[in-house]
Structures are given as C-alpha cells and as structure tokens.
C-alpha cells in the first residue's frame, strides 16, 4: 500500500464517520425517522452532484428508483 492509498483510505473512513455522526444527530437530537434521514442524505448528495456536474449529467447517473421518485419502494 502506498502512502497515497493509505491517505485515501483514512479520508474515506473519516468521511464515513462524519456521515454516521450526522445521521445519529438527526435521529437523536431532532427525532428524525430513518426515512427522513435517508431523504435528507440523498437530497444533499444529488444537490452536490448537480452543482458539480450539471443537472443533465447528474440525472443520468441516478438509479431509476430515485429519478422516478419511488423512494417508498427502495428497500
């Protein structure tokens, strides 16, 4: 493993911890349901994709369930 690989793994782990902590905060501090947490996380992620890629490119990358609004059917 190179030094760059190790740094990438550490960064991925740290970002995962931040996402996990954020989900716990939503649930513990404001009582958000799992569905609301997932909705907020996905909405944020898609908004970031759009801001970086543009809406057409971002929409092309989304799974069909998400682009068709079938959030209730995603398990």
Image (spheres, grey):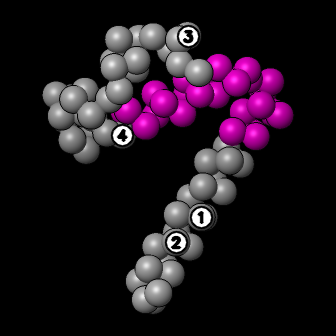
User: Hey, which quadrant is residue 14 in on the image?
Assistant: bottom right
User: Hey, which quadrant is residue 67 in on the image?
Assistant: top left
Secondary structure at numbered mark 3 = helix
Q: Is residue 35 above or below residue 5?
A: above
Q: Position of residue 22 (x, y in %)?
A: 67, 43
Secondary structure at numbered mark 2 = helix
Q: Position of residue 44 (x, y in %)?
A: 46, 34
Query: What is the crowding at mark 1: few (fewer than 14 residues within 10 Å), some, or many (at least 20)?
Result: few
Disc 3 designates what residue?
72
Q: Nearer the viewer, mark 2 or mark 4?
A: 2
Residue 68 horizontal side relative to residue 15, left or right: left
Disc 1 designates what residue?
13
Q: CA distance from mark 3 to mark 2?
A: 33 Å
Q: CA distance from mark 2 to mark 1?
A: 6 Å
Which numbered disc, 3 or 4, marks the residue that appears first in the sequence? 4
Q: Residue at x 46, y 27 (%)?
A: 43
Q: Residue at x 52, y 63 (%)?
A: 12
Disc 2 designates what residue?
9
Which numbered disc, 1 or 3, marks the residue that appears first in the sequence? 1
Query: What is the crowding at mark 3: few (fewer than 14 residues within 10 Å), some, or many (at least 20)?
Result: few
Q: Is residue 39 magenta?
A: yes
Q: CA distance from mark 3 to mark 4?
A: 22 Å
Disc 4 designates what residue?
48
Which numbered disc, 3 or 2, marks the residue that appears first in the sequence? 2
Per the rendered image, the range of residues in magenta is 23-47
């Amino acid at each position: 493993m190179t030094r760059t690989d190790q740094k990438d793994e550490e960064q991925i782990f740290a970002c995962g911890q931040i996402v996990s902590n954020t989900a716990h905060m939503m649930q513990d501090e404001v009582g958000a349901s799992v569905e609301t947490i997932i909705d907020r996380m996905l909405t944020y992620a898609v908004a970031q994709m759009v801001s970086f890629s543009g809406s057409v490119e971002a929409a092309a990358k989304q799974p069909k369930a998400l682009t068709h609004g079938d959030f209730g059917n995603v398990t």
